Amino acid sequence: MTRVLVVEDDPQTADEIKAALADHGFSVDHAATGRDGLLKAAAEAYDAIVLDRMLPGGLDGLGLLATLRAAGIDAPVLILSALSGVDERVRGLRAGGDDYLTKPFDFLELTARLDVLLRRQAAPQRETMLRAGKLEMDLLTHVVQHAGRVVDLLPREYRLLEFLMRHAGQVVTRTMLFEEVWNYRSVEPTNVIDMHISKLRRKLDPDSAEPMIRTVRGAGYMLHAAD
């Protein structure tokens, strides 16, 4: 069951939030102060935190949020606040909040926003790096390195190598390469793949007698991923 910590000092508002989240199927714990919220968040693993911006006792919502993030607690945090100005919303988000909902609010919107944060938290993280042995490809910067040496590739060579790296150790056919790298759905007799493979080999293994990209006779090609 999804566990949510509600940090809210107003008893009536806290009871209403707890009831709405419980009706939505969440297991809810409550803390009335920033210190109590910090203790609960540090002691238990919560899937999400609903955090009031203004809290008594010397530790307000933003102070609690900064402390949680510094402690490595990365549960998504939905900030609740009567401070609706743009500057205040920006402060909340920059302090580590994942969403900001101004008071008064509708409980349907509260649960909907929590659902979005939970889906985002559960989604797989975007892949940013491919590795095959000593070969590395940064998908954000498009920098390719082999054994620490930067390899300068043309756009088509980059896409070809990316496909081979995603299937390292597997045989990929010419048809697969034509469809996925060249976006062709019919394969005409041509040596365009052979030409690009040859160029890639020279760039990756200029002095190697045994290239990383192997030809598999009658089948296609395979990127050998051994160190």
Image (cartoon, rainbow, N blue to C red):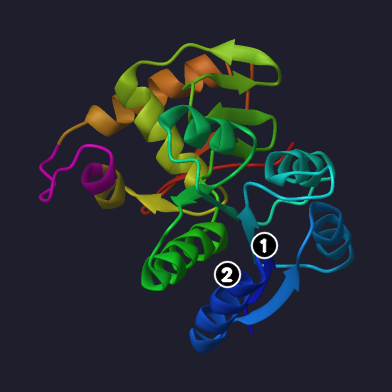
Question: Residue 139 magenta-drawn?
Answer: no
Q: Which residues are magenta?
A: 178-189
Residues at marks 2 and 1 touching, judged by CB atoms closer than 8 Å: yes
Image quadrant occupied by the C terminus:
top right
* Residue 151 is at least partly visible in this image: yes
Residue 55 in the image: state x and y as whole percent.
Answer: 72, 50
Q: Residues within 10 Å of mark 1 (few under 14, many from 20)?
A: many
- Left-right relation of 23 to 176: right
- 187 relative to 135 in the view: left or right: left
Question: Is-magenta flag for residue 183?
Answer: yes
Front residue (pair 187, 55): 55
Instruction: Decide which of 52, 211 is in the foreground and name it.
Output: 52
Q: Which mark is residue 13?
A: 2
- Dividing the picture into quarters, in which one does residue 4 lie? bottom right
Q: CA distance from mark 2 to mark 1?
A: 7 Å
Mark 2, other Cα within 10 Å: few <14 / some 14–19 / many ≥20: few
What residue appears at the point 32 percent right and 21 percent down from the top-left corner?
155
User: Which residue carries the number 1 mark?
Assistant: 8
**Amino acid type of the residue that numbered disc 1 sits on in the rendered structure:** Glu
Point 69% across, 30% down: residue:
134
Residue appearing at x 56%, y 58% in the figure: 121
Q: Quadrant of residue 94?
A: top right
* Residue 6 in picture, x, y percent from top left: 67, 67
